[in-house]
């Protein structure tokens, strides 16, 4: 039973650039949520995707956007990167009717220089 | 963004000791979860709680959903070195059942 996978593992970008992070949900799951975890803090909700649409959004600017594909995998895009975007980006998957039990991937460590 | 208050912030204990940590919110929650995160990894779900007063165990771990619905507790009995990590509480409010709101974390260090 494959768990949540994310790619890449690490990424280094320059201010102003754009980045795309990828996530494949746990087998059988149809809902994907993205979180940002700054160093020393708990994860912060970015948004959630279900049926290829953004269902819920946290307090993040429009520079953060996403997409969900028919196979339930998802991408997180961040435009015009800022130094403050440096963080661990976590993807979590769940079933639509059980979004309380979210299972996390290993994360993508993004460093913006 | 909103975060739950967790305490203590860190704990340094000896192997074999019991551990208690808690999480509080100013809002009522209808779900509480406890996660453990190792360095460089994503959080791993330990226990999920759905009803006020509920007490649930997972091996040496026991968690409780507070009766006020504004707090939760996690106990670890007879700690072992592999218990080292950061423990996060997380919850969902009654008006937003999609996103998880996380606590600030409790860092646990176990000495042999």
Image (cartoon, coloured by chain):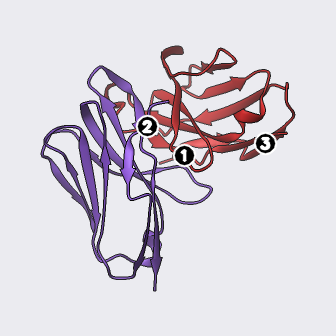
For the residue pair A88 and B58, the one nearer the viewer reads as: A88
Contact, mark 1 vs mark 3 (Cβ under 8 Å):
no
| Chain letter, disc 2 residue | B
Q: Is residue A81 left or right of residue A103?
A: right
- Badge 3 crowding class, 10 Å Cα cut-off, few under 14, some 14 to 19, many 20 or more, is some
| Chain letter, disc 3 residue | A
Q: At numbered mark 1, what does the secondary structure look like: helix, strand or loop?
A: loop
Q: Residue at x 54, y 26 (%)?
A: A72
Find disc 3 in the rendering and name its residue: A11
| Chain letter, disc 1 residue | A
Contact, mark 1 vs mark 2 (Cβ under 8 Å):
yes
Front: mark 1 or 3: 1
Q: Residue at x 49, y 40 (%)?
A: A26
**Residue B36, relative to residue B96: is it above or below?**
below
Question: What label does residue B12 carry, if any?
Answer: none
- Position in image of residue B106 (x %, y %): 43, 57
């Amino acid at each position: 039973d494959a768990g949540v996978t994310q790619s890449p593992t690490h990424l280094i970008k320059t201010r102003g650039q754009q980045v795309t992070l990828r996530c494949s949900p746990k087998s059988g799951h149809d809902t994907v949520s993205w979180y940002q975890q700054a160093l020393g803090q708990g994860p912060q909700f970015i948004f959630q995707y279900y049926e290829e649409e953004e269902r819920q959004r946290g307090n993040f600017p429009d520079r953060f956007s996403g997409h969900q594909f028919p196979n339930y995998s998802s991408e997180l895009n961040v435009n015009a990167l800022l130094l403050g975007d440096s963080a661990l980006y976590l993807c979590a998957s769940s079933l639509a009717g059980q979004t309380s039990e979210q299972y996390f991937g290993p994360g993508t460590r993004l460093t913006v220089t | 963004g909103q975060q739950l208050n967790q305490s203590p912030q860190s704990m340094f204990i000896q192997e074999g000791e019991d551990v208690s940590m808690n999480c509080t919110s100013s809002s009522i929650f209808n779900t509480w979860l406890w996660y453990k995160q190792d360095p460089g990894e994503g959080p791993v779900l330990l226990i999920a709680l759905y009803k006020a007063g509920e007490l649930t165990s997972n091996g040496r771990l026991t968690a409780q959903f507070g009766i006020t619905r504004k707090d939760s507790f996690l106990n670890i009995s007879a700690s072992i070195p592999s218990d080292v990590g950061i423990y996060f509480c997380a919850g969902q409010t009654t008006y937003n059942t999609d996103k998880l709101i996380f606590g600030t974390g409790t860092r646990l260090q176990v000495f042999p």
